[in-house]
């Protein structure tokens, strides 16, 4: 691919930042605040808009309800548009209410399931009011001890509940279903892996797709292989982007394993160019949402690092010479094939990204630009009082 083609592809990249990535979060031991943290959803949108102004590739912001609940969602969407961003995917919260102690959509008690379905339907209304087209669903449902629940009964409760939620969606809306290996449940999680999410999506409908959170796998799992499989099935809906050292650490993207990110990006780039329309269309519709949580780091810089890490990974993936790779593969030249990837991965793409930023009309170095900006100072000076959190 020529450099100008690569720049075109990078200019069209779209990374969604998440409202809860700008607030004070942390671990169950302590939540640290950092100066300049937003106090409400309006200020979270201000920060998402700033990240977009600094990078040029983050034009939407994901919401989580009720964390981002307001009286007038139309006004919120207009406010976002005035700042230069739009509302992206929206997540219902089915894990922070006392009624969900033993689950939400999987709960044995039909009244609790009804409540969780009702909340998700409320989120569909929020989607309509804000122009959002994607519901991003994660369930904390699971059990802590053998014998606590019946796997199949719980699975069927989820399926039935999801069908109702799916029916409430408009025809142009998508449901993306996240899986997670463990936490907060430790013995079993009802939707623990991609296969469990995929088989549910296949039963629910064409617009139900799998969401891959990069933090939600056991160590050593080959995530790019999962991505390729889901693309092939036409069921990769989106990503929750972050990085992990141990489990769901929610570190900023590419912090621990940028090579893995490159290999994932490569599967997506390949799929976007696939002659099979079903694969290419699926890849082009994938949502790239960040899902990270700041523990001790400053939030806006952490978000900028994630967005730029995605640019770096994709720039390198776009450099891979597919024809050369296929030749080595056909000849059984294992080392040569790997060298093609290595060549691309080891290329310094920083000059290309500087060119891209010039073309996008954004600072050459977004992190530096933010560090010395009046925007940063203003946030620290003006945002006094209780910071927003989970
Ligand atoms: C759960 O760990 C998760 O990844 C889900 O996506 C939630 O919506 C998000 O984290 C909350 O931070
Ligand atoms: Mn997630």
Image: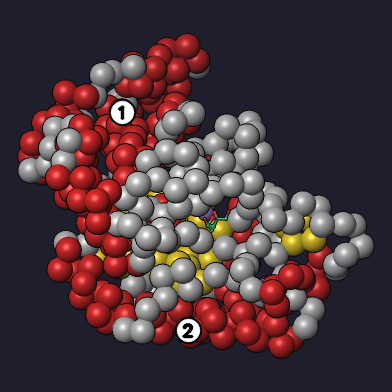
Secondary structure under the numbered disc 2 in the rendered image: helix
Visible residue check, residue 370: yes
Is 115 placed above or below 48 here? below
Is 75 left or right of 252, judged from the image as shown? left
Is 129 placed above or below 293 here? below
At x 26% / y 19%, what residue is drawn? 348
| Closer-to-camera residue (232/295) | 295
At x 62% / y 67%, what residue is drawn? 95
Secondary structure under the numbered disc 1 in the rendered image: helix
Asked if the residue under mark 1 is in contact with the one under mark 2, i.e. CB atoms within 8 Å, the reply is: no
| Closer-to-camera residue (376/385) | 385
Q: Quadrant of the N terminus?
A: top left
How far is the residue under mark 2 from the one under mark 1? 41 Å
At x 16% / y 23%, what residue is drawn? 351
Image-quarter location of ligand 1: bottom right
- Marking on residue 316: 1
- Marking on residue 122: 2
Is 350 left or right of 223, judged from the image as shown? left
At x 41% / y 58%, what residue is drawn? 387
Is 256 placed above or below 294 here? above
Instruction: Kindly report which numbered mark, 2 or 1, lies closer to the viewer in this rendering.
Output: 2
- Sequence-wise, the earlier of marks 2 and 1 is 2
């Amino acid at each position: 691919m020529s450099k100008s083609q690569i720049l075109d592809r990078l200019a069209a990249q779209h990374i969604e930042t998440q409202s809860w990535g700008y607030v004070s979060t942390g671990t169950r031991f302590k939540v640290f605040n950092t100066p300049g943290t937003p106090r409400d959803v309006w200020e979270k949108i201000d920060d998402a808009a700033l990240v977009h102004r600094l990078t040029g590739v983050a034009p939407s912001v994901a919401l989580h309800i009720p964390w981002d609940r307001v009286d007038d969602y139309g006004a919120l969407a207009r406010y976002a548009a005035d700042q230069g961003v739009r509302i992206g995917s929206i997540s219902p919260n089915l894990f922070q209410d006392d009624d969900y102690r033993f689950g939400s959509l999987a709960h044995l008690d039909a009244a609790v399931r009804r409540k969780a379905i009702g909340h998700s339907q409320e989120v569909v209304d929020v989607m309509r009011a804000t122009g959002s087209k994607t519901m991003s669903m994660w369930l904390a449902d699971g059990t802590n001890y053998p014998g606590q629940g019946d796997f199949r009964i719980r699975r069927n409760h989820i399926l039935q509940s999801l069908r109702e939620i799916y029916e409430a969606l408009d025809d142009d809306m998508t449901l993306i279903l996240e899986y997670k290996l463990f936490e907060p449940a430790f013995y079993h999680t009802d939707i623990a892996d991609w296969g469990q999410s995929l088989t549910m999506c296949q039963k629910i409908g064409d617009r139900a797709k799998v969401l891959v959170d990069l933090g939600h796998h056991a160590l050593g799992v080959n995530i790019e292989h999962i991505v390729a499989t889901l693309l092939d099935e036409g069921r990769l809906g989106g990503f929750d982007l972050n990085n992990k050292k141990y489990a769901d650490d929610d570190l900023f993207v590419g912090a621990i394993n940028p090579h893995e990110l490159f290999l994932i990006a490569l599967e997506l780039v390949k799929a976007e160019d696939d002659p099979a329309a079903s694969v290419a269309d699926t890849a082009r519709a994938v949502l790239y949402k960040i899902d990270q949580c700041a523990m001790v780091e400053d939030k806006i810089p952490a978000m900028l690092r994630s967005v730029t890490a995605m640019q770096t990974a994709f720039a390198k993936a776009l450099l891979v010479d597919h024809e050369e790779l296929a030749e080595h593969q056909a000849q059984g030249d294992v080392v040569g094939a790997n060298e093609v990837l290595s060549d691309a991965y080891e290329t310094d793409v920083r000059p290309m990204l500087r060119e891209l930023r010039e073309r996008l009309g954004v600072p050459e170095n977004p992190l530096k630009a933010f560090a010395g900006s009046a925007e940063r100072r203003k946030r620290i000076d003006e945002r006094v009082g209780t910071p927003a959190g989970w």
